[in-house]
Image: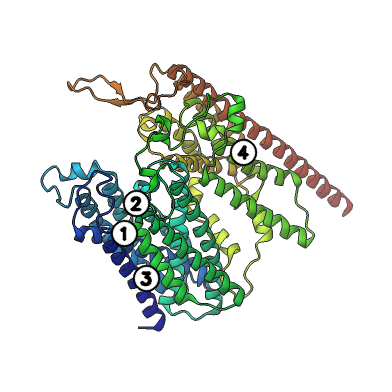
Amino acid sequence: MSRGAALAGAAAGLGLLVAAVAVLVRGPVGYAELGLDDPGAALRVAVPLLRAVVDLAGAATVGGLLVALVVATPPADSGSAFTPTGTRALRLARWAAWVGAAAAAVSVPATLAESVGGRLPLGPGLVTVILARGEPVSWLIAAVLGVATAVAAGEVRRWTGGAGVLALALAALLAPVATGHAADGVGRDLALPATALHVVAAAVWLGTLGVLALTGDTEPRSWWRAARIGTAAGIATVASGAVAAGVALSAPGGTGVGGHLDYTVLVLLAAALGVVAGGVVWRRRAGRVVWPVELGVLAVVVGLSAVATRAVPPVQAPGATSAPTAVLGYGFAAAPDPWVLATSWRPELTSLTLAATLAALYAGGLRRLAREGARWPVGRSVAWFAGCALLVVATSSGLGRYGPAVLSIHVAGHMLVATAVPLLWALGAPIVLARRTLREAPPGGPEGPAEWLEHVLAAPTLRVACHPVVAVVLVVGSPALLYLTPVFSLTQPLGWLQPVMTLWFLLVGVLFLGPLVAGPPNGPGLPYLARLTFLLATMPLHALVGLALLAADHPISRTPVLPADGGSGQVFVDDFFVRLRLPWAPDLLADQHLAGVLTWLLGDLPLLAGVVVVLVAWSRHARVEDADRRADLLVGLGSR
């Protein structure tokens, strides 16, 4: 065993030991507050230890894939997909995924037994009992995704395949977050995305460093890239952790340090992250790599985090909250009107982080062009930054804040994200900018961002998704599936799904409008007439979704169920908007009719603008072709 492997194993063992000791020191704290019986010392230790194993294994899986994809990369002209170090990292990622899947599977009965006082309810009703509790279900999903990741990791042969497996690994890592502390209580809309980013960034930080040590790679460039990734991930880990802890400690019931041991766990976690962050900054400034210390502290942080998941945070402390706060995590000061929608901001961290990151990357490309003395159309820059700003407005202004409580506002935000933002981004031509500013790897040099971009753009999955027929089905079928079926009423209470749906609408809009308005990244793409045909054909389909909402005779926010007598009719129960008990709540059916109108207008107006853009581009292309033909004709006449 190499020195690096021994140190990485020692760090993981230290993290598990700290978790076990912390559980034993805490004792049976928190169960009485939640109305649960003490499950016994064995389960009290086993559950957080299993969580720590899952987290460490998930970090190793993510880190192994990142080492193979972006850290220890082969020369750009070698024709190989992975280096020997990358191949070893993929092997480690596969075995780590199997370990994580096994620990997640064991966590299903363990968390169920913990919630019922240590006695597992065996019998024919066991499956029903599991499905009725959120935490065991999330572990079951994590186990299934972990198995899929392990199987897929063994079949990776190309860069794009590894990127797909990385997406699976991140999904498995985030599944338990959806039912954790951040998904419940006051401020959950802020705490949940902050915790998700915290988990991902910490896994990237720990996993990249740990796997690179396990592979025994001594290449300076690989460690330099790992240091860059660790610095960025460390900043994201500390910042997102501070947001999540701030939400917990500022909630009703939070009295600061010393009130409960649970608070002390949070403070220890924050302090450990601060120590690690300081070590990373010192390492980067001093030019030295102190990775064993960094790895050990990170493993301890993972152990403490696992223990903290079993504590009772202040956000779950008993207290008087309004109905909207209990359901959504925040309340409303007034009824929505134009002024309130313009001034009632509440950050939606997922979209805000995405918009800020994309704006910063675009600005970096413009800066590099300016240093080289190259010109870039101002209109493209304006369009890109306007799209980023519109994404923030649609998700973090009053549109985002009141969207979960008012259907028409919810629809308005989604339609802006699905059509207007992608149109502006397509006009910004980001792929053209990236290709002009990202430097290709030198002969014999390792692959870098320019080559990774080309790998992504050449991926078969992306080519299929960008096909106009597939893109039309996605961009029209997504709102139809959400608003014209019980999907909306069933998913609206699940707060963690709201940012996921926003990102989905944004993605399908980009896949549809990008190739039609800006052209595909590779090749000439469809003729202009075909582009116009697809744009014009999509407009009445959007209108049909709006008309269906107008014609509905019942609010879509009601959950349909079969009647108890087994008849063929339907009854409607458990209306989500009624559950909010808002004093200014609009008439549900009238608001739904307004939502239908907004679906039509906000879905079709950006498409109409896209038609105008394509017509202008077609006209310019035709003039250029005419000028070329005239030039060829003059050259031919002059040669006679």
Residue 503 rendering spot, x and y as whole percentages: 49, 43
Instruction: Measure how far apart labels 2 and 4 are at the Cα level.
Output: 31 Å
> What element does badge 4 sit on?
helix
Identify residue type, mark 1.
Arg
Q: Which residue is mark 3?
A: 92
Callout in the foreground (1, 3): 1
Q: Which residue is mark 2?
A: 176
| Furthest-front residue in this view | 258
Instruction: Measure how far apart labels 3 and 2 are at the Cα level.
Output: 23 Å
Residue that appears at 41% across and 72% down = 296
Identify residue type, mark 4.
Leu
Quarter holding the N terminus is bottom left
Residue that appears at 22% across and 52% down = 114
> What element does badge 1 sit on?
helix
Mark sitting earlier along the chain (4/1): 1
- Choose between 105 and 615: the one closer to the eye: 105
- Choose between 64 and 17: the one closer to the eye: 17
| Furthest-left residue in this view | 123
Instruction: Measure how far apart labels 2 and 1 are at the Cα level.
Output: 9 Å
Instruction: Measure how far apart labels 4 and 1 are at the Cα level.
Output: 39 Å
> What element does badge 3 sit on?
helix
User: Quick check: marks 2 and 1 in contact, CB under 8 Å?
Assistant: yes
Q: Which residue is mark 1?
A: 51
Mark sitting earlier along the chain (1/3): 1
Q: Which residue is mark 4?
A: 390
Callout in the foreground (3, 2): 2
Residue that appears at 62% across and 44% down = 388
Callout in the foreground (2, 4): 2
Mark sitting earlier along the chain (3/2): 3
Residue that appears at 48% across and 33% down = 476
